[in-house]
Amino acid sequence: MTLTVQHNVSLQPFNTLRVEAKAREWVEVRSQEDCAQLPALCRDKKILILGGGSNLVLAGDVNGLVIHNQLRGIECVRQDEQHVWVQVAGGENWDAFVAHAVAQGWHGLENLSAIPGSVGAAPVQNIGAYGVELKDVLESVTVLHLQDGRTQILTRAECRFAYRDSIFKSAFKTNYLITHVTLRLQRQPTMKLEYGEIRSALQSAGLDEATLTPQQLRELIMDIRARKLPDPAVQPNVGSFFKNPVIPHEQLMRLQQRWPELVSYPVDADHVKIAAGWLLDRLGWKGRQWGRAKVHDRQALVLVNSGDNARDLLALKDAMQADVREKTGIELEVEPLIVGGHE
Ligand code: EPU
């Protein structure tokens, strides 16, 4: 079947901020056969790959070709006594896959439960939560070069993962479609319970660490997230709007003179990561309304949109960045991808 390009397609159903913007051209990719036709369609075009649209801010219409990755499939490609290697197509829903993995007895993803979005988007920002990052379990990423149709497999090292970062945000940012992600999962669970809130949540739920099952850990993480983070289906959002800044140790010491309880996590010998949500909260941003945008009531790192465009949301983001810059000298980096309009 020939791939059909549609014109002026509304992107509102495909972004979790529910922004109304149009894609000048739009194509859905469902099979390897579809992939083979992409290079001919992509030649000399500006491309945007769309997964779950849960880390995307549409500042206006997208004047290029939007490729909606709908590739499906989960396949166990290899196993030994300790591990199972699972290849997952980029269009699969991330959390549906995590649920499937836990049910199959494939472990290591429990702490990454309930993250919105698609499997193909997961390596782009190296999704992470509750002490686990995708890079901890990732074996390789398969990409299709959209200009010449070549397939390439990138190892974990080649993906250059870092905190909320990868090669897919720099050298491999445009003109590549992530078709598959291969993960190396464990056959015996080893629970990661070190992140701040997990142990206290275990206690409150009356769960015993010694007998905790992977399914119980998944449910616990889902409960923690549901308590703190707004459900995008009810309150349109893209999760954390800013990255947690990584700063030199001396700067932390200076900030701690003003805020002794500032929350920080070690990164390396000279740097720490500080909780931007904590800082924004102390600066009074939590719950603030800004036109049709708002800072979430329970997590100052999350912005909620109630309009059908992102104007107020982006103005709110600017005001928050300016305030943090002025009060601390720190430049908050935006976490989601901002596209469209006159960029
Ligand atoms: N805090 C406040 N007030 C706030 C927000 C946070 O005091 O308004 C405090 C918390 O009490 C805690 C600390 O700041 O002591 C850190 O907060 P939290 O554990 O909620 O984590 P975070 O640093 O705000 C990061 C990720 C989240 C991820 C959580 C859990 C980033 C940018 N965000 O948030 O990821 O779920 O840790 O691991 O790294 C996302 O990327 O979209 C996302 C939601």
Image: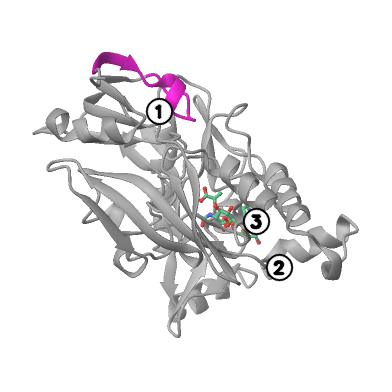
Sort mark 2 into few (<14), some (14-19) or many (20+) by Cα contacts within 10 Å. Answer: some
In magenta segment, residue 21:
no
The residue wearing badge 2 is 193
The answer to whether mark 2 is within 8 Å of ligand 1 is no
- In the image, residue 159 sits, relative to residue 334, either above or below, namely below
Which secondary structure, mark 3? helix
Mark 3, ligand 1, within 8 Å: the answer is no
| CA distance separating discs 1 and 3 | 33 Å
Magenta-drawn segment: 5-20
Numbered disc 2: secondary structure: loop
Label for residue 325?
none
Tell me if mark 3 has few (under 14), some (14-19) or many (20+) residues whose alpha carbon lies within 10 angstroms of its own. Answer: many
Please state which amino acid type lies under the numbered disc 2: Leu
Residues at circles 2 and 1 in contact by the CB criterion of under 8 Å: no
Residue type at mark 1: give it: Ala
Is residue 205 rendered to the left or right of residue 182?
Answer: right
Q: Tell me, for residue 310, which label it has, or none.
A: 1
Question: Which residue is pictured at 33% across the width and 46% down the height?
Answer: 178
What residue is disc 3 on?
A: 110
Mark closer to the observer (1, 3): 3
Q: Position of residue 56 (x, y in %)?
A: 40, 37
Residue 188 sits in which quadrant?
Answer: bottom right
Q: Amino acid at mark 3?
A: Glu
Q: Residue at x 32, y 15 (%)?
A: 9
Quarter-of-image position of residue 108: bottom right
Nearest the viewer among 254 and 135 is 135
Residue 147, picture quadrant: top left
**Residue 13 is a magenta residue:** yes
At 63% from the left and 45% from the top, the residue drawn is 100
In percent of the image, x 75 and y 52: which residue is there?
A: 215
Give how far apart the Cα atoms at labels 3 and 2 are.
11 Å
